[in-house]
Image (tube, rainbow, N blue to C red):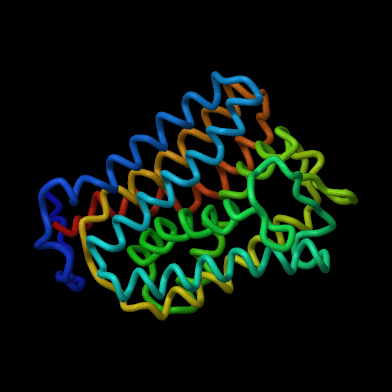
Amino acid sequence: MSERIYAGPRRDSGEGRRGWVWTLPFIFAGLTVLGQILWVLAGPADRLILTIATVITFFLSTVSHALIHRGAGWTGVYLIITLGFGWGIEFLGTRTQFPFGDYIYASLLGPQLLGVPLVIPLAWSMMAYPCLLAVQRLVRTELAVALVGGFLLASWDLFLDPQMVGESYWTWRLVTYTLPGIPDIPLQNFLGWFLASFVLMLLLSFLPQTVARDGAPRFMLSWIFVSNVFANLVFFDRPGVALWGGACMGAVMIPFWYRIWSQPQW
């Protein structure tokens, strides 16, 4: 018989908060899942609305969870880092072609700041949070968090970019080398994503690490992984995307699932 033991830190300042506020991350997570399911069934005009709406609800799930379980100070610094980095790296990318290649945003995604849709930094911020918490369960040092977390966050883009390019939300003006099974997106983009994600996770790794009830971000990260593999196989007819995204993201998600099963925090 095996005994599952968690030996890490066990306290954070937000765990005493309960009531309806405690359910907010789950409410926003549920709205995100519902919106993404409807997205698959919707037409192009409705898909655009649902794309923006689900980014906002996912972002609100992240922010509300961080506020409840990690406090206003931690959350404020997290938002400054992720929103600032998300906008800054996209501004750099659209101006210099580094690190993602020669790409341009359409005007479909709402208000822009210097050519970058404002919804894009929200997407960086919403996804970096569950990725950060997941890899902190797997590794300890800041460098390891940056490497594994950067890989996990960049793996998400293997799903994201084919879907968004398919909707013409952004396009590459020059495509040379590509991954087999993922056309229309240069290999440079995915390498650039890993570099950018590594830097972002390295910055976030210096935030104070606390243990909390991370059910909502854990659920969202698992949902993003499983739903994207399933949708690309069944609905989008992109087996190459499902294979690349499933293999790369799964390389972190499967050990993460085992860790939370074998070493529960509560």
Q: Is residue 143 above or below residue 91?
A: below
Total numbered labels: 0
| Foreground of the two, 199 or 82 | 82
| Foreground of the two, 23 or 45 | 45
Measuring 39% from the left and 53% from the top, which residue is drawn there? 255
Measuring 60% from the left and 55% from the top, which residue is drawn there? 118
In this picture, residue 43 sits left or right of residue 38? right
The x and y percentages for residue 26 are: 27, 43
The x and y percentages for residue 126 are: 46, 54
In this picture, residue 99 sits left or right of residue 241? right
Q: Is residue 117 above or below residue 196?
A: above
Q: Quadrant of residue 64?
A: bottom left
| Foreground of the two, 113 or 243 | 113
| Foreground of the two, 136 or 105 | 105
The x and y percentages for residue 28 are: 34, 42
Q: Quadrant of residue 9?
A: bottom left
The x and y percentages for residue 173 are: 88, 49
